[in-house]
Amino acid sequence: MALNLAHQIGTLAGTQVVAEVPTGEQPSSAPANVSSVRKVPLASLRCNAPRDTVSPPMLTPPLTPRSAANRSGMMSPTLRADLSAACQAYGTLSPLETADESSFAAAVAWKEGGRKEEKRGVPVYVMMPLDSVTYGNTVNRKKAMNASLQALKSAGVEGIMIDVWWGLVEREAPGVYNWGGYAELLEMAKKHGLKVQAVMSFHQCGGNVGDSCTIPLPKWVTEEMDKDPDLAYTDQWGRRNYEYVSLGCDTLPALKGRTPVQCYADFMRAFRDNFKHLLGDTIVEIQVGMGPAGELRYPSYPEGDGTWKFPGIGAFQCYDKYMLSSLKAAAEAAGKPEWGSTGPTDAGHYNNWPEDTPFFKKEGGGWNSPYGEFFLSWYSQMLLEHGERILSSATSVFDGQGVKISVKVAGIHWHYGTRSHAPELTAGYYNTRYRDGYLPIAQMLARHGAVFNFTCIEMRDHEQPQDALCAPEKLVKQVALATAAAQVPLAGENALPRYDEYAHEQILQASSLDVEGSPVDREMCAFTYLRMNPSLFHPENWRRFVAFVKKMNEGKGARRCWEEVEREAEQFVHVTQPFIQEAAVALTQ
């Protein structure tokens, strides 16, 4: 039996792939006949090595992909006459090898073994490149994108996450929306049978960890911010941050007669109306951006221009006139008008450590004084109210549309082991050794039926600088308990790109939510992998990723060991390897 690669990939993915044909020819409409594919029983695999013996990787794995020229050596020397549809999409002839029947049958058996079982486990989504849609409102690297989506589907990925940039769609004028590139990209996802988490990205792209391009806020928004700089978040030294409109003016008609929250609501409503036919089927989740990097937080640690460097404590962002006006009113209401003129003046600079500052030091620090408690309560409450306002709009807009609403919360794990948790405080999370700052956030999300999406799921405590008392594992456990108490679904993301088994193991462990005090049958509702890029499609990375997805899909209580799943994945990868190699090369072009 001979199935060309297009048919093989299509069968594995559960979708038919129709190859492009020259004008005048008719493509065959006959689906690949896989009913006769012999299911090759997998050999009994013994795995004696315990899972926790995986060697830790380098803490800073190389993130820069190899050049396309270097990749060419990985390609098969054999040139097939019947190129697959996916490789034809690149517009060049591709050196593809013919997979033998037995390896393909084994791969089909591996795939069907996961698909025919009752739905369980943690579905895996993959973040798309930040620049998936161009300034010309078209899909970037369309042919490579199409091939990559097919590869992800074939690997058992549930879906993809797409940033829907405010600065692209409503760029030119208020209320004028151009959905061009997104309409095409969403249709591509639908064609491949992938679900979509759509991020309403009301922030600037550029300036945060991992940002590979720059997409500013809409022109008409930045024009208003130029006229009134206090629309931007401001620190005590007068430095303005233009990543996101200050929440201090949420309810003021400061943007061409509309409030920022109205702008966000109108944008979401336009998205709903334009893609109503995909909501609940292809588009299954709306993640609502609420701050820099799309996270519910203040821009307290801006990395882009070198202002902040890890693991600095950051700085409070409450010095625009709108925030100060709110602070003054709160101080007067508390009977302490002297507290309302400014924020803390002894909280150090962005790159200080807690013990460098009078406000954050463990003994006698201002954070633990009556004034500190007043200020931090106000500062964090302003962030919660910001979340409430936008969530109220989002749930109203998408009510009855069959989609989940989610909110992303930053995993600020550095200096977590100190008493004051200074970096969390400057970001707006009132979390200290004596106070749970994540339960109020979870409770706010619970009121709106939203998902709590949390980062740094892949990190282990010992991988981080111990002199900075980093503790991502402890932080994730705290969030797991807070969401369990509030009865809010918890989803996860990795904060930094990782392709190694050691990180995969940590994600598996964290997503199982095996935390004392948490329900035994609880798991994360989803995990989103950062991110699709050429490095993901390197042969070894892809093999590990396929096995990781399979293990996540199996979920808590899976009895098979990691090594067994990896061996099964290798058979699947063998069939798809030429296709994946093409995707890796195309993404670099």
Image (spheres, helix red, strand yellow):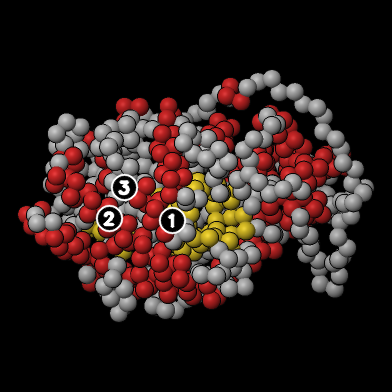
Which residue occupies the foreground of this view, 536 or 250? Answer: 250
How far apart in space, not on screen, are marks 2 and 3 (Cα)?
9 Å
Tell me the mark number nearer the camera, choosing from 1 and 3: 1
Residue 566 at x, y percent in the picture: 69, 33
- Seen in the picture, residue 34 relative to 404 is either above or below; the reply is above
How far apart in space, not on screen, are marks 1 and 2 (Cα)?
16 Å
Question: Could you tell me which secondary element the residue under label 1 belongs to?
Answer: helix
Which residue occupies the foreground of this view, 508 or 10? Answer: 508
Q: According to the image, label 2 marks what residue?
A: 381
Asked where in the image residue 150 lies, by quadrant, the reply is bottom right
| Amino acid found under the numbered disc labelled 1 | Ala
Q: According to the image, label 1 marks what residue?
A: 446
- Seen in the picture, residue 500 relative to 96 is either above or below; the reply is above
Whichever of callouts 1 and 2 sits on the residue coming sooner in the sequence is 2
Q: Badge 3: few (under 14), some or many (20 or more) residues near its Cα, within 10 Å?
A: many
Residue 585 at x, y percent in the picture: 64, 48
Tell me the mark number nearer the camera, choosing from 1 and 2: 1
Whichever of callouts 1 and 3 sits on the residue coming sooner in the sequence is 3
Residue 23 at x, y percent in the picture: 81, 72
Q: According to the image, label 3 marks what residue?
A: 429
Which residue occupies the foreground of this view, 463 or 556? Answer: 556
How far apart in space, not on screen, are marks 1 and 3 (Cα)?
17 Å
| Amino acid found under the numbered disc labelled 2 | Gln
Tell me the mark number nearer the camera, choosing from 2 and 3: 2
Residue 294 visible? The answer is no
Image marks 2 and 3: residues in contact by CB distance under 8 Å: no
Image marks 1 and 2: residues in contact by CB distance under 8 Å: no
Residue 110 at x, y percent in the picture: 77, 41
Whichever of callouts 2 and 3 sits on the residue coming sooner in the sequence is 2
Q: Badge 1: few (under 14), some or many (20 or more) residues near its Cα, within 10 Å?
A: some
